[in-house]
Image (cartoon, coloured by chain):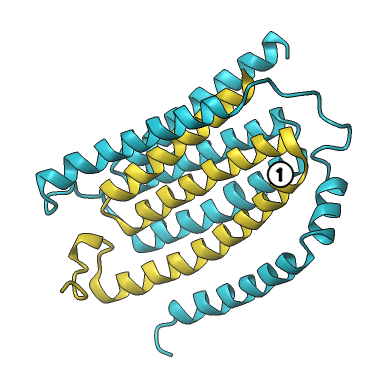
Amino acid sequence: MTALTTTAYVVLALLAVLSALVVVWHRNPVVSALALAFNLVAIAGFYLVMDAQFLALLQVIVYAGAIMVLILFVIMLLNLRQELRGRDSGLLQRVLGPLLGVALGLLLVRVLWRSVTSGFAPPSPEFGTVASVGRELFGTFFYPFEAISLLLVSAMVGAVLLAKRRL
Amino acid sequence: MEPKIVLAVSGVLFALGVIGVLLRRGAISILMCIELMLNAVNLAFVAFSRMHGATGQVFVIFVMTVAAAEAAVGLAIVIAIFRHRQTVDLDGLRILRG
């Protein structure tokens, strides 16, 4: 791995973590949503640097392009104001929650850091291409693929039904 | 070194998502933090797939699909809540509380 790719990893890591902090911290839901879109594009950048080209495109199209637009539409339609700072939850919850979250983060980072011993090996030339992912998807994972298409149909029906004004 | 960076980012993003779900009050903000957690998991999947084969990427496709379905249904629920209470503040939803 050259120094340039390592720099790319570090820069992407900083962008992803900083935008995630804005998502979690900022009170305005619109700013949160835009920071989340930035985070999703940073993760697409990670996929690209790791040679998973098909997934990088899917991430931008599906996540940043469809799900974030959906979320922004709903924020716009509901005309939300600034979110109030939590006051109803007690001091214990407001302190203990983030504390336990930080403990979880430390545990995850420690375990994941020690789980890999070497760097990335050079990939096979067809790693990350549509063909290789498609071969896996329609071969080994054919039944789950059909199952998630049923899931999408039921989600569409459910979303329309739940949002109807009167049944 | 690079896999360590990617996996550390994945862990940090997941923990930030958990903190966000615990701290935020608005329903949409909580949904966004859940999306953050799902993306952290996707990142770990791709990192391991880079080391072990294409199966991880197929799992990422499944997770993205489920996340899209869950976002659609979750936002429909948020709209239904808003229609009844004119707010999406989840701290006020305590009808099921014992």
Q: Is residue A135 left or right of residue B84?
A: right
User: Residue B96: horizontal and vertical position, in percent?
Assistant: 22, 75
Q: Is residue B68 above or below residue A42?
A: below
Rendered residue at 40%/57% (across/down): A76
- Residue A31 lies in quadrant: top left
Taking the view exactly as shown, the residue that stands out farthest to the bottom is: A167
Please name whichever residue, A14 or B14, is drawn nearer the observer in this view of the structure: B14
Q: Chain of mark 1?
A: A
User: Residue A75: horizontal and vertical position, in percent?
Assistant: 39, 57
Rendered residue at 37%/56% (across/down): B28
Q: Is residue A74 left or right of residue A26?
A: right
Rendered residue at 88%/48% (across/down): A131
Q: Is residue B63 left or right of residue B18?
A: right
The residue under label 1 is A55
Say which quadrant the C terminus of chain A sits in.
bottom left
Q: What tint does the image give chain A?
A: cyan
User: Residue A141: horizontal and vertical position, in percent?
Assistant: 76, 61
User: Residue A101: horizontal and vertical position, in percent?
Assistant: 32, 39
Type of amino acid at the residue the image marks with label 1: Leu
Chain in yellow? B
Q: Is residue A124 above or below residue B53?
A: above
Please name whichever residue, B20 or A119, is drawn nearer the observer in this view of the structure: A119
* Residue A16 in view (yes/no): no
- Residue B13 lies in quadrant: top left
Rendered residue at 55%/55% (across/down): A67
Q: Is residue A165 above or below residue A102?
A: below
- Circle 1 packing at 10 Å, graded few (<14), some (14-19), many (20+), is many
